[in-house]
Image (cartoon, rainbow, N blue to C red):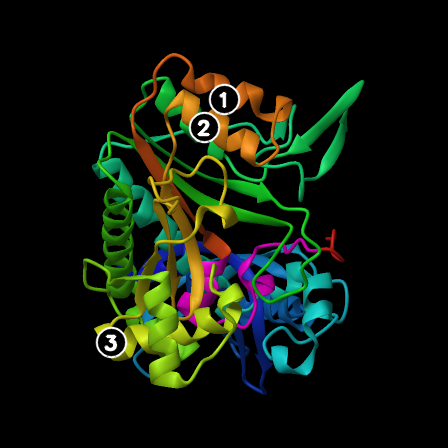
Amino acid sequence: MTIQELKNHFNEEVEISGFVDEIRNLKWVQFLVLRDQTGKVQITIEKSEEKNKELVSLVDSLSVESTVKVKGKILESPKVKMGGMELTPNDILITSRNQGELPFNYKDPSTVNLDTRLDYRYIDLRSEKNLLMFQIQSTLVRYMREYLYQEGFTEIHTPKLLGAASESGSEVFEVKYFDRNAYLAQSPQFYKQMALAAGFGRVFEVAPCFRAENSNTSRHATEFTSFDVEFSYINSFHDVMDLEANMIQYAFEKVHDLYGDTIRDVFGMELKVPKTPFPKMRLSDVYQELEERYGYHIDDSEKNDLTTEAERLTYQLAQDKFDSEFLFVIDFPAEKRAFYHMRDENGILQGYDLIWRGVEITTGAQREHRYEEIVRNAKEKGLGDDVKFYLDFFKHGCPPHGGFAIGVDRITMLLLGIPSLKETQFLFRGPNRLAP
């Protein structure tokens, strides 16, 4: 039984387990606060009662952060601030003992630097705020999944060990694979498309991706969790944008219903459920508006992609122009994008970036599905034998399709106003961190 369930069992004998969060040993009474992943409960032991003699002695030897199993009666007690209930025990079993002083006070992270917290992540994650963060992240992913299941998608699981570097030969981790080299997958992109060439129609995957980028920023990692989506029989990349917007709206509405007040009270962020369709602007128009509205000037040579500062300013632009936190930016030149993205007759990418709160959370596109065209694109990018296995997917017919990917850690960071995805990843992996 969890602590959250206790309120349904007043005046009954119950058994619960958890961490000892607090001990108050007063003259006539002992109070233990027990916590599990669902909450906290007060355990009250009257010292004057003879039957409690052994319990009192046990608590005298107990330290916080030990784990215990408690049997007793749960009583409704409006005077107790902790859920309006208390548990009077008849048996306490110590299931593990805390062996010493904690390396830092996880209840007050301001007293320790982030690197130390990450060194002892198993302690850092004990904080209520961290636990809540991952519960919210889990809920967000759950409802994005749910939306796709309702739309007829199949969840797949693609390999992360590849015989050839995916997408390009750069920014990949090379590993020894018996008597030859292998590579960690940068994304499931090639295999998502293989599934569509096989006739799966609509697929998605939630899985790790690996990027050998020596980036030390608040929003990059060498391993991260990606929510990848791909589907067939689209008419244009606008169909991809529409599905992504509808999925986000659906998941955000569910998260808002369950955690909206908590996100505001604990994280100081207001979760706004977006309206669909999301606004969209051409890249050239974005730069024109940023210049006219906010005086943001850059050289024309830099306007073939969104600069970091331009991304940041789009948050204000989206709110001022569209009353939205989201903005699709379209009409990127193809030279900056992957060879498998479709282009129109003028070389304009048939894809987009989705910006939320001034940060790119998605690059999506219609994919090139015509064999002759994708072979030509690969050659232009200098890709040959490394991607031959991928090009073969399109030799025997493949429907028009497109897709996108969302970084789960990054969207959590933005959702809750966390300064860095080092905190929104269960265990961060970066250029200088491979442990714990």
Disc 2 from disc 3: Cα separation: 37 Å
Residue corresponding to mark 3: 321
Of labels 1 and 3, earlier in sequence is 3
The foreground one among 148 and 298 is 298
The residue lying at 29 percent from left, 43 percent from top is 237
Q: CA distance from mark 1 to mark 3?
A: 42 Å
Q: Residues within 10 Å of mark 2 (few under 14, many from 20)?
A: some
C-alpha gap between disc 1 and disc 2: 7 Å
Inspect the image, locate mark 1, and give the three-letter code of the amino acid beneath it. Leu
Above/below status of 218 relative to 146: below
SS of the residue at dot 3?
helix
The total of numbered circles placed on residues is 3
Chain-order first, disc 1 or disc 2: 2
Q: Point out the frontmost of discs 2 and 3.
A: 2
Along the horizontal axis of the image, is 106 left or right of 43? right
Identify the residue shown where x is 22% and y is 72%: 322
* Magenta segment: 410-430
For residue 81, say whether it is visible.
no
Q: Nearer the viewer, residue 190 or 44?
A: 190
Q: Contact, CB < 8 Å: mark 1 with mark 3?
A: no
Q: What amino acid is at disc 2?
A: Ile
Under tag 2, what secondary structure? helix
For marks 2 and 3, the one nearer the N-term is: 3
Question: Which residue lies under the disc numbered 2?
Answer: 374
Which residue carries the number 1 mark?
A: 391
**In the rendered structure, which amino acid carries the disc numbered 3?**
Lys
